[in-house]
Amino acid sequence: MSTSIVKVSHLRFGPASKPILDNISLDVEAGHFMGIVGPNGAGKSTLINIIAGLTHPDGGHIDLMGECLTRYSRHRLLKQIGFLHQLHDHQPRLPMRVSDVVAMGLPNYAMPWSWGDDQGAILEALTLVDMETLAGNDFRQLSGGQRQRVRLARALVRKPKLLLLDEPSAALDSVSQDRLFRLLRRLCDETGMCAIMVEHDIAAISSHVDSVACLNRQIHHHAMKGENIPDDVWRAMYGEHIQIVAHDAGCIGCSPDTGGDHHHD
Amino acid sequence: MIDLLSDFLSSPVMAASLLPALLIAVVTASMSVMVMAHRLSFLTVGVSHASLAGLGIAVSMSLPLLPIATLFSVAIALLLALMPKRQGISEDAGTGILFAGSMALGIVLISTATTTRVDLFGLLFGNILTITADEKLWLYFLGSLILIVMLLASRAWWSIAFDSVTAEASGLPVGALRLLLYGLVGLTVILCVKLAGIVLTAGLMVLPAACAWLWGRSLAGLWLLSVGFSVTGTCAGLIWSYTYEWPSGASVVLALCGLFVASWTINTVLAAIRTQK
């Protein structure tokens, strides 16, 4: 029996008559790697932001590491979370070395008395994302993909129990994307970290994750490994005009088979 | 040159105003780095101009100038930090409104005050040479307060400047830290008014960091360079002021502008040479 890292119960966000998220319940355990997919405007980022403690839900509640997320527990709980949010044309302006950027992820970085940063932990996090040779470089001069890997190192340097990622592969080519998903898979398996990742390309993630939640205002389906996502779920999420294309048979949710056991209106 | 310096230092007025001027230079240079990092240049313009209303209130009610102006400018800065979120008015518009309104109020109050004669030129453009012993004490107090708070909060502020969303998600109280920063900008503005006046304060709050940004390779380097540029500009400005009898505030700001133009030119030429290679 593994421990529950994130437990979301009957979460609602937005007005009751027209909610952005409605009746969301999830229970994710240590070592689990979950993908959240859904169309634009489905509320994926909102859900991630609520779990990250950035947005307050209008109903329901969230337990992190078995403790209710409130204004009082927030600070303590968030120190155990790594968060990689979606960036839109984020141009770094501050002159910082790569290792300085990663140091900002250390749990006590902002405390006035923590001047000597844990260089060992920083190097370790950079090694995970294959950026250790660039530790002394100017962050501003890196490519978009390299910056994204440094940001991931920054989220990992605190050795989080929960890692939240909002479309982390946006700036990456397909090789780095695959490497990223493999790394996350490995961390979940080896360290018991739990990862929740928003992506819109289900085909790219399906062979790496343990489960996929299909989100469009509600969670329409929660597929575990080896399970197919039925056609009507796709339609409920993306509308009638969706063409379902077959990928390799081994992955979750890619099968063109109709049918299945879930029905949604 | 040596003659000029010894002349300058032996002049009692200059000797008395050199230390406060250097303190102001160090404090404003430190804060200017944060002002640049958080894109608050326009806030410093707004708050410094708005502080005229604080000075006006003090003059018309015969209260001590600096403490009242200090309270007023911190209040304005905090108001600006809180206003945009509450009313949906963009921050620059809010700054513009408060800036014009308070300045108008200040001018009316000062011009109708018949009891005291006020050195309006000194308030607008600064005059460190007329600093009194009380004012000096007040500046030392404010200056050390600002530096201490800044040392304690700088890492949190860098974190927010780099990426405020991640900073908040890592548990930092971003809203409260932002309020603290705005309040401290309000305090720093008052410190500058004595040296550069209401109109030129933005020069002290923006130029040192702007120079440093061209050369800085790390956050600590940025800070040290900014202080270096600011101290150099202040010394040069005071010497000019003494030698040619120019107004002190304007001389310091001109010296800083000169440093910026020189830095920018050298930096651009070096970058061009590097790409040629």
Image (cartoon, coloured by chain):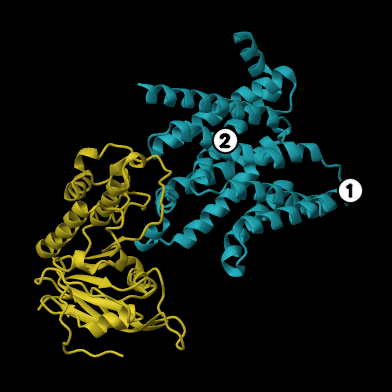
Chain colours: A yellow, B cyan
- Reading the chain from its start, which is encountered first: label 1 or label 2? 1
User: Please, what is the three-letter code of the amino acid marked with disc 1?
Assistant: Thr
Mark number, residue A18: none
For label 2, the SS is helix
Q: Which image quarter is the C terminus of chain B in?
A: top left
Mark number, residue B207: 2
* In-front residue for pair A215/B217: A215
Count the labels in the image.
Answer: 2
**Does the rendering let one see residue A53?**
yes
Q: Residue at x 66, y 17 (%)?
A: B8
Looking at the image, residue A215 lies above or below residue B98: below
- Disc 2 packing (10 Å; few <14; some 14–19; many ≥20): many
Judged left or right of residue A178, residue B133 is right
Q: Which residue is mark 1?
A: B115
Q: Residue at x 32, y 72 (%)?
A: A51
Task: Give the percent coordinates (x, y) of residue A204.
Answer: 20, 64
Judged left or right of residue A77, residue B11 is right
Task: Give the percent coordinates (x, y) of residue A254.
Answer: 17, 73
Judged left or right of residue B276, residue B200 is right
* In-front residue for pair A125/B63: A125
Check the residue under mark 2 and report the chain it is in.
Answer: B
Check the residue under mark 1 and report the chain it is in.
Answer: B
Q: Residue at x 56, y 66 (%)?
A: B85
For label 1, the SS is loop
Residue at the farthest right position: B114
**Does the rendering let one see residue A9?**
no
Task: Give the percent coordinates (x, y) of residue A109.
Answer: 33, 51
**What is the spatial separation of the Cα atoms under label 1 and label 2, in whole angstroms?**
38 Å
